[in-house]
């Protein structure tokens, strides 16, 4: 599979499957390009599916400079993937860290995004939670750096919004946890500090979010506590958005409930393609009950 080079000289591992209109997947912090396998298997008979591992995630390069990691850089890397593959526009699906990237990509490059699926994006976004999230992120980064990914994965993979996956599908969860344990420890630490802990609060972007014209589907598990309130805010703020809540589901929604996730995304993309995804009617925003 090819590697593409970004404008700052970092090589990113990219995989393509299928033909048709491009569908770009952007992974979460605890995942990599392999995390989208159930989606690639489902969508590759109708779409050109592109997955890649972010910088810091082998087989992509792991830059040693902390300044090489940021939300701004994550957006530029997504654009680099599209550019190097000759893709002008794509449907984009992102989970968690990848969901934030997808949202920022939509804000900054609306001409490149036909539709956006923003799944499990919300941790640390609420103003009351931001400082605590940043402190926890830095502590987690220190653990990756000093204890190593294999050790950190033992606890990270059973977080409050991951145990749902473990309970429903122990074998699938074990594959997820094993892949997390294989991550580059320094790359994970630098990503946690530079991308996760340093990203702006979604609430500070409400004015910009309200101007989005790109179709957006927000997906969240109803037991993904850190994302529920921020995602409801996104629904209320982005006029072209819809909100899908997956029942008894945690953070790793695309792996935990692949059939439901795939069918939900498929219906959204199909609606966008046939021009049936609508902007919210302002008459629904009067505040009146009847």
Image (spheres, rainbow, N blue to C red):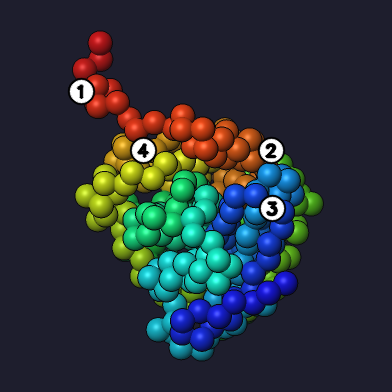
Question: Is residue 49 visible in this depiction of the protein?
Answer: yes
Nearer to the camera, 166 or 3: 3
Image point 51% across, 86% down: which residue?
A: 9
Instruction: Indicate left or right for 124 with 42 as reference.
Output: left
Q: Earlier in the sequence, mark 2 or mark 3?
A: 3
Question: How many angstroms separate mark 2 from mark 3 (CA)?
Answer: 21 Å
Residue at the limit of the structure toward the right, as seen here: 171
Quarter of the rendering occupied by the C terminus: top left
How many residues crowd mark 4 within 10 Å: few (<14), some (14–19), many (20+)? Answer: many
Query: Which numbered dot is residue 240?
Result: 4
Residue at the disc numbered 3: 19
Element marked by disc 2: helix
Residue sitting nearer the eye, 169 or 107: 107
Task: Measure how far apart labels 1 and 3 are at the Cα level.
Answer: 44 Å
Mark 1, residue position: 286
What number is the disc on residue 259?
A: 2
Q: Nearer the viewer, mark 2 or mark 3?
A: 3
């Amino acid at each position: 599979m090819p590697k593409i080079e970004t404008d700052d000289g970092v090589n990113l591992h990219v995989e393509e499957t299928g033909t048709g209109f491009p569908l770009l997947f952007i992974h979460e912090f605890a995942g990599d390009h392999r995390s989208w396998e159930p989606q690639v298997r489902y969508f590759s008979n109708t779409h050109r599916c592109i997955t890649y591992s972010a910088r810091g995630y082998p087989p992509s390069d792991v830059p040693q400079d902390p300044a090489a990691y940021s939300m701004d850089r994550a957006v530029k890397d997504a654009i680099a993937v599209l550019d190097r593959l000759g893709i002008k526009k794509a449907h984009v699906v992102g989970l968690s860290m990848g969901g934030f990237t997808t949202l920022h990509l939509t804000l900054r490059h609306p001409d490149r995004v036909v539709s956006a699926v923003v799944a499990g994006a919300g941790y640390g976004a609420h103003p009351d939670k931001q400082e605590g999230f940043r402190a926890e992120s830095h502590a987690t980064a220190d653990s990756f750096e000093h204890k190593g990914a294999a050790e950190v994965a033992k606890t990270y993979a059973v977080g409050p919004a991951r145990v749902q996956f473990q309970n429903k599908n122990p074998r699938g969860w074990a594959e997820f946890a094993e892949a997390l344990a294989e991550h580059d420890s320094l790359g994970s630490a630098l990503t946690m500090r530079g991308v996760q802990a340093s990203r702006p609060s979604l609430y500070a972007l409400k004015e910009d979010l309200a101007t989005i014209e790109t179709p957006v589907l927000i997906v969240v598990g109803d037991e993904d506590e850190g994302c529920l309130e921020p995602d409801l805010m996104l629904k209320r703020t982005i006029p072209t958005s819809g909100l899908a809540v997956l029942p008894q589901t945690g953070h790793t929604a695309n792996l935990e409930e692949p059939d439901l996730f795939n069918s939900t995304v498929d219906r959204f993309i199909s609606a966008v393609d046939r021009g049936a995804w609508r902007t919210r009617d302002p008459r629904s925003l009067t505040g009146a009950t009847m």
